Amino acid sequence: MRLVFAGTPDVAVTSLRALLESRHEVAAVVTRPDAPAGRGRRVEPSPVAQLARAAGLEVLTPARPREPEFLDRLRAIGPDCCPVTAYGALLPQAALDIPPHGWVNLHFSLLPAWRGAAPVQHAILHGDDITGATTFQLVAAMDAGPVYGVVTEPIRPGDTSGDLLGRLAESGSGLLVATLDAIEDGTVRAEPQPADGVSLAPKLNPPDARVDWKLPAHLIDRTVRACTPDPGAWTEYDGGRVKLWPFTLTGEVGQDGQDGQDGTVGTVGQDDVAARASVGPAEVAGLAPGELHVARGAVYVGTGSGPVRLGDVQAPGKRRMPAADWARGLRLESGDRPGFA
């Protein structure tokens, strides 16, 4: 089939690569206009646009997909079908009506669960054990079209949203190509989504990523992992915002605050966090929510169900570093009781 692919961020690049290697013809790409990116905030083309131009494809960057110039150009290209992965803008009905086989969207959840912009983050945030990817036909309502196919993916105890999205991008790209093959062959039919089980996954913003240390440790763990890498979990220390990465714990903490000798160092799980975090010296076990204990080579913080050991942190204007290195720079005096707000 002759295709026009729509996508914007890095996660969509995997789909475009798979389509370029498939039996189908990618005639053009639709992506969001150039935007500021990176630490320098320089205006750059999207990751999808960069790959498309390297492959010699026409790149369409409408500010609004309802623009007559864009719709006219799409009609002139004449796609049979338009696959979509994380395009980032709503498509009007006039655009949806152009390709005979419609627009086929790759969405990173098991629909009808987690319709919206942040399905992977919400799956982790809410403690799901299984997620996946779905191909479905785009309709005017958000993520509500009939489904062509699904793949499933377990959520591992230490998964961040970045980890999980990376795996789903790979498996999902294979599903997208297989769906297009089946549409061309006439061997698949889109089935309506069930009316039950609908949940929404709106975009997570920085206020959603602030850690509440009064919550149980396993809920804080979910927040941090769901918000890594974007929008980035954070807390407040001494009036400044400190960015947090996922916690690490030891299976046992010695009386000097060092790691135990049993070798059980690993990423925090979900519901077992509070039990594992409760071991250690009395000054660690008794930490109030948000209160810090700086030990040799480790920093612990209290939660609503027991302390956890911090992983990497990033203070304002500083680079990312292990929490112990950050704590050494604070030059705390004996008897100080630092804490996160």
Image (spheres, rainbow, N blue to C red):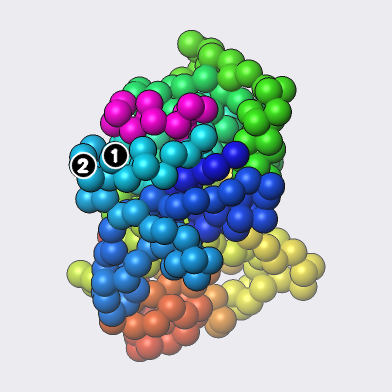
Q: Residues within 10 Å of mark 2 (few under 14, many from 20)?
A: few
Q: Which residue reaches farthest top?
A: 195
Corner quadrant of residue 327: bottom left
Q: Quadrant of the C terminus?
A: bottom left
Q: Residue at x 59, y 49 (%)?
A: 25
Q: Residue furthest front?
A: 76
* Label 1 packing within 10 angstroms: few (<14), some (14-19), many (20+): some
The Cα atoms of the two marked residues, 1 and 2, are separated by 6 Å
Q: Is residue 160 above or below residue 171?
A: below
Residue 114 lies in the magenta-colored region: no
Q: Quadrant of residue 337?
A: bottom left
Q: Can you give x and y, in whole percent of width and height, for residue 109 in the image? A: 54, 35
Segment tinted magenta in the rendering: 92-103
Q: Residue at x 63, y 28 (%)?
A: 183
* SS for callout 2: loop
Q: Which residue is mark 1?
A: 71
Proximity of marks 1 and 2: CB atoms separated by less than 8 Å:
yes
- Nearer to the camera, 234 or 61: 61
For disc 2, the marked residue is 67
Instruction: Return the x and y of residue 139 as percentages of the image width and height.
Output: 40, 24
Helix, strand or loop for disc 1? helix
Q: Which mark is residue 149?
A: none
Q: Identify the amino acid type marked 1.
A: Leu
Q: Is residue 286 left or right of residue 95?
A: right
User: What residue lies at 53% left-to-right and 66% top-to-bottom?
Assistant: 55
